[in-house]
Image: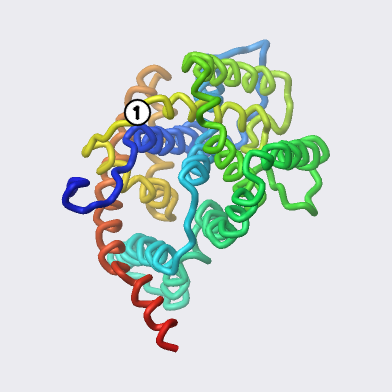
Amino acid sequence: MLSEKKTNRPQRNSSIELYRILATFAVLIVHFNGWFVGDWPLPDYDISNPTLFRTGQMVFEALSIICVNMFVIISGYFGIKLKLSSIIKLYIYLALIYVPLYLVRFVSTHEFILSDFLEKCFVISYAGYFIQCYFMLMILSPVINAFFDKYGKESLKWVVVFWVLEFWFGCIMDVEELGYNRGFSVIHFVLMYMIARCIRLYEDEIKKMKRWVWVFGYLLSTIVIMICFVLGIKWCWDYSNPIVVFSSICSFLPFLYKSYYNRVINWIASGTLSVYIIHVTNRIQTILETVDRHLLETKSYPVYLIMISGVILITFIVSTLYGIVCNYISSRATKDIDKKAKAVMSFE
C-alpha cells in the first residue's frame, strides 16, 4: 500500500478498519453458530435443561447478532458518496466472485446451464439481501446526505422517531406491509445509516464519555438480548431489535477514541466484503454447512468450538485474500471513470 505522501490520499483510520474486520468475524460466527447447523432462528431455550451447547449457542449469537448493523454503521459514519465508479466497481467486484465460482462448479459437476450462468452475470439481482439492500442504500444516499446537510444536529430527533417507528411497527406489531422485515430491509439499512450520521455529528460530545461506558453498554445489551431470548420474545434476534441496534452503536463508539494508521490492518480490511459474499455462495455454503454439522455431531462442544474456530479463520483468510485481488482489479478498472464521465457530459 502506498504511503499518504506518495498518493496524496487520506489514510483510512485503522481503528475503524479493525472494527470492519471484527464485523466480518461476527457475520461468520452468526452463520456458523446458527444458520449453518440448521438453527435459524435459534430454537426456544429450555431453561429446565440448559445444555452446554444451547447455552453457548445463545451467548455467541447474542455477542455477534450486531454483525450486519456494524457494516452499515461504518458506511454511515464515513458517508456514502454516490458515484458512477462506485456502482461499476461493485458490479465488477461481485462478478469476479460469482462468475468464477460458477465456472468452478461447472468443472466439478460438468453441468453447465446457460440460464444459470447468465443469472450469475446479473450480480446485483443474484446477490443476497445484504448486497441488494446496500446497493439501494447507495442509490438513496444523496437524499439522506442532503437531509443531514440541511438539518444538521436537528436531524437526531427525526432519527429517534424513525427508530421508534421501526420498533413499534416492525417488532411489536409486525406489520408486513411496511417492509421492516426484521431488519432484512432497505428501511433498516437507511435507519442504521442515519444513526451513524448522527454519531458523526455528535462525535465530540460522545468522546466526552469514558470509553468503558460504551463497552459496558455493549455487554449489558448482550445480557438483555439473552434474557429476551430465554423469555421467548420472538424478535430478540431481529437486526431491528432496538436492543440489538443499541448494542451495535455501543460496539462501534470505542473505536472512535483513537485514530491511527496500520498498513496491515487496512490491507486485510480491504478484502473483507468478499468474506461475506463467498461463504454464503451456493456450493461454498454447502461445503461449510457440511463441515459445521459434522463437527458438531461428532465432537464434544468444547472441541467443536476449537475446530470450528479454525474453519472460520481459514474461511476468513482465503476469502479475504481473494477479495483483495478483486478489490485491486475492480479499482484499476474504474480508475478515473468519474472524470471521463464528467468530461463526456461537459462535452455534450
Residue 159 sits in quarter: top right
Does residue 121 appear to the left or right of 39 in the view shown?
left
Dividing the image into 4 quarters, which one contains the C terminus? bottom left
The residue at the point 22 percent across, 37 percent down is 264
The residue at the point 35 percent across, 38 percent down is 17
Would you place residue 235 above or below residue 305 in this image? below
Would you place residue 297 above or below residue 93 in this image? above
In front: 306, or 191? 191
Q: Is residue 315 visible?
A: no
Give, as a three-letter code, the residue at label 1.
Ser
Q: Residue 330: image x %, image y %?
A: 30, 63
Q: Is residue 116 visible?
A: yes
Q: Residue furthest top?
A: 48
The residue at the point 28 percent across, 66 percent down is 107
Residue 88 sits in quarter: bottom left
Mark 1 surroundings: few (<14), some (14-19) or many (≥20) residues within 10 A: some
Mark 1 lies on residue: 309
In front: 147, or 90? 147
Residue 343 sits in quarter: bottom left
Q: Residue 95: image x %, image y %?
A: 37, 66
The residue at the point 68 percent across, 31 percent down is 242
Does residue 14 appear to the left or right of 119 in the view shown?
left
